[in-house]
Image: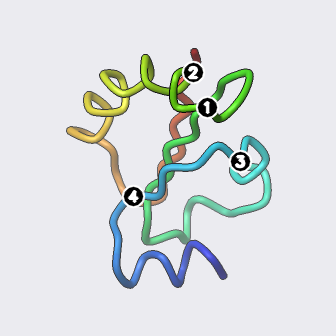
Amino acid sequence: MLLRTASQEFQVLLTGDQNLEFQQNPDVLPISVIILVAVNNRIETLRPLVPRVLEILQNIRPGQFVRVDA
């Protein structure tokens, strides 16, 4: 429900919820999901992931889940 609602306004969801990809069927999702994998969600921890996120945004497709590890 969250992803379908988000897809009405956005093309990509950026999240730290590592279980989300196991709770959804990506084949029917109209939105892409980038999952940030880090020891915590502090900006100092996540900031180094930004360059990789920007790369992924260039080619990500609807329904695709991509994990970005610290």
Specify the label residue 12 is tagged with. 4
Specify the label residue 17 is tagged with. 3
What percent of the width, then of the height, locates residue 13? 47, 58
Above or below residue 60? Residue 53 is above
Mark 2 and mark 3 residues within 8 Å of each other at the beta carbon: no
Kind of residue indicated by mark 1: Arg
N-terminal of the two: label 2 or label 3?
Answer: 3
Specify the label residue 25 is tagged with. none
Which residue is nearer to you in this view: 49 or 11? Answer: 49
Kind of residue indicated by mark 3: Asp
Specify the label residue 45 is tagged with. 2
Which residue is nearer to you in this view: 45 or 6? Answer: 45
What percent of the width, then of the height, locates residue 54? 27, 33
Residues at marks 1 and 2, CA–CA distance in whole angstroms = 5 Å
User: Which residue is rendered at x = 43% and y = 65% of the image?
Assistant: 31
Mark closer to the observer (2, 3): 2
Residues at marks 2 and 3, CA–CA distance in whole angstroms = 15 Å
Residues at marks 1 and 4, CA–CA distance in whole angstroms = 21 Å
User: Which residue is rendered at x = 34% and y = 80% of the image?
Assistant: 9
Residue ID for mark 1 = 42
